[in-house]
Image: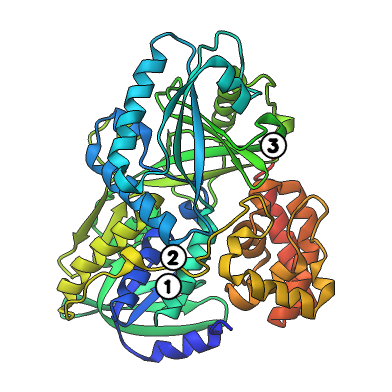
Amino acid sequence: MALSRTDLCNQLSNSFDIIIIGGGATGLGAAVEAATRGYRTLLVEKYDFAKGTSSRSTKLVHGGVRYLQQGNIKLVMEALRERGILKQNAPHLVKNQSFIVPNYKWWEGPFYGLGLKVYDWMSGQLGLGESEWLSTEEVQYYTPTLDPEGLKGGVLYHDGQFDDSRLAINLAQTAIESGAVVLNYAEVTGLIKHQEKVIGVKLRDTILYSDYEVQAKVVINAAGVFSDSIQQMDDAAHETTIAPSQGIHIVLDKAFLPGDTAIMIPHTDDGRVLFAVPWHQKVIIGTTDTPVSTIETEPKPLEEEVKFVLNHAARYLTQDPTYSDIKSMFAGLRPLVKASAKNTAALSRDHSVTISPTGLVSIIGGKWTTYRKMGEDVINIAAIQAGLPYAESVTHNLLIHGADPVDDFNSDDYYYGSDRPALQDLVFKYPQLQKKIHPDLPYTEAMVVWAAREEYAHTVEDVLSRRTRALLLDAKASIEASPTVAKILAKELKKPQNWIDEQIVSYTILAKQYLPL
């Protein structure tokens, strides 16, 4: 049984070694890193875990073929090593995904083939499989809906695929099980200072409507695209360090790309890579790289971005997808580190750690694949800053909550891993909970109950967007399922009827933004 929110909040009267602001990939990785070293750790997230960028990725754990093209060998090597570590530590969430790079020009086969052989070599013992050249017939066998006109074969290679928000939830659980206090819906309203040094944070719990002042030996800002706002709490004159870039994805029915093999288009009109990847019995296609000036909690796909993805998909698929085929579309903001590059596609995906004159430690940049290394790096620096006793990192071989080998990644509940027996026991005890929340969604009422009891879900959005992936897979069906989810949550969380009504309305407004224009 998970610790309740009340149990966790009761520990806020204590002081901590480390406070981490931000419950995305970076913050959660740092929390696991700190707690498993024995440091007293608090992580707070203003909204829900992975509410922002960390739930809106392409769902790939990869070294980054494009970064190899750019010559960023260090990032690719590090990411490939971390890809292998994550597959070992979270085998219930990370799978080997095969990709085909189709060749339509004579030189593409040897060019991309040799590049991907280098990619294989860089993976070393943590590789997922060797790349290979394919004939035209073999490419068509693996990807029958790929446009055959002018096709001259292809290259098959391997990378990792995962479920981003499910990993975030499991990291939060891992941190709590390792002794950390981890809270979503806990907003930092200010920093506490003593003699010009940051010694803690002011918190507002937006679930239980309580305010706290919590002290620590060091505070880490891991707020992703919002990290500048935390640094400006520390120093109002702080100059922004984030150059936000928006990337969007569209989700289509699996008929557009049947089978288990993904497609990677290595060069789009704007110089990016385009992926079409099977995921949860649907197909995700993306992404874009659009500089934006405003950082929003709920970024929206721009019309030109959706057209860009649809147009590129139509070039390579036998059936041209249209707006009416889109089941859902979503946008995420990349927290790229500012540089002199002319476009955001060329900005660094590396992370950097800074320490302000007041001792606030900030980590910016990075990507999901390297979250563990980012956590290790920032805790190394924060521990020295705080004068904490030295402790070795143990996360290299640390199993993440739920870790359990998966036989069938197409099953509807594979991502629960070692929690699956307990979830099945819940259905055995209450058979009515095996009912689906919607005919077009694979999720049961038991999963909603489980999300509330074990996974710190507090809203309909938490359940439909991040504990399940209903919002991303079929936004319309998720809207239709929201009354059922609201009623189950209300019973679990002891909420009144007006809360149910408010949740349905707010979720419907949100989910409509994921539907085609």
Q: What separation in Å lies between label 1 and label 3 (alpha carbons)?
A: 37 Å
Q: Identify the residue at image location x=49%, y=73%.
A: 173
Query: Marks 3 and 2: which is nearer the front?
Result: 3
Q: In which quarter of the image is the N terminus?
A: bottom right
Question: Tag 2 or tag 1, which sits nearer the N-term?
Answer: 2
The numbered dot on residue 254 is 3
Q: Is residue 495 visible?
A: no
Mark 3 residue type: Lys
Question: Where is 263 relative to 499, above or below?
Answer: above
Question: Tag 3 or tag 1, which sits nearer the N-term?
Answer: 1
Mark 1 residue type: Val
Q: Is residue 254 visible?
A: yes
- Which one is nearer the viewer's eye here, 436 or 152? 152
Q: Identify the residue at image location x=56%, y=38%.
A: 249
The quadrant in which residue 5 appears is bottom right
Mark 3 element type: helix
- Count numbered badges in the picture: 3
Q: Identify the residue at image location x=37%, y=70%.
A: 32
Mark 2 residue type: Gly
The numbered dot on residue 44 is 1
Q: How crowded is mark 1: few (under 14 residues within 10 Å), some or many (20 or more)?
A: many
Mark 1 element type: strand
Q: What separation in Å lies between label 3 and label 2 (alpha carbons)?
A: 32 Å
Question: Where is 88 relative to 39, above or below?
Answer: above
Cβ atoms under marks 1 and 3 closer than 8 Å: no
Mark 2 element type: loop
- The residue wearing badge 2 is 23
